[in-house]
Amino acid sequence: MNSPPYLFDRREFIATVAALGLLSRSGAGWALPAADAAIPEPPWLAQEPWPTVNAVLAHLLPAGEGVLGAEQINAIGYLHTTLTTPGADDGQRARMLAGAERVSALAQTGFGKPFNVLGAEQRETVLRTLEGQRGGQSWLSALLNYLLEALLADPVYGGNPDGIGWAWLQHQPGYPRPPAAKRWYRLTPPIRRRSKAT
């Protein structure tokens, strides 16, 4: 049975991201743009499941020569904002957090350590094991989607700090850009009034 078309292969995903950055360039010797300042580590990042999720994101999209990594695009900040703000999809949040718990359990079972302290080969083993389990590939695919969003979304949503992803891709964002007060999850949904029975 073929995998659904929305599921990504990690190597294909990394190649796609790298290609996005290279397509708009001619010649060699270019460097990645730098964010204006280092992003301070938020307190929630020290509490599970976020260290595990952050380590998975970094493993799925490692920084390389000419390639932005998950840390540089603040993928964990974007994902945390997306999953924890009012109006977020409760079902998606529950699925993502449950997947992180499975990763933690596999790391402890296989290596007796938290996932975020494992080496690259051990992390790969854990994620390949998860991939072979029911729902594992779908969970990893969802993380890859979030990585792309963190790379391309407006910085107001937590990822792509200082437009580093846009600069890397030489992308000009559309205008007007969303102000912080009008991010989608801050907008109050319209109140639906029930029509009175006649």
Image (cartoon, helix red, strand yellow):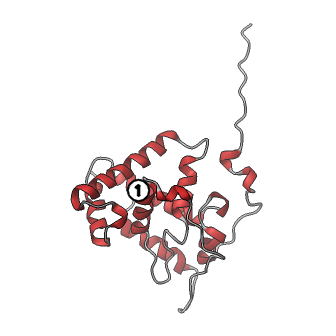
Residue nearest the viewer, comparing 132 with 181:
181
Q: Which residue, as the protein is rendered here, is positioned at the far right?
A: 176
Q: Quadrant of the C terminus?
A: top right
The answer to whether residue 4 of the structure is visible from this angle is: no
Secondary structure of residue under mark 1: helix
Give coordinates of residue 25: x percent, y percent: 57, 84
Give coordinates of residue 106: x percent, y percent: 27, 55
Would you say 22 lies left or right of 167 here? left
Residue type marked 1: Ser
* Rendered view: 115 above or below 15: above
Determine the residue positioned at 61% across, 60% down: 158
Q: Which residue, as the protein is rendered here, is positioned at the far top?
A: 198
Marks counted in the figure total 1
* Rendered view: 47 above or below 194: below
Q: Which residue is mark 1?
A: 141
* Rendered view: 17 above or below 181: below
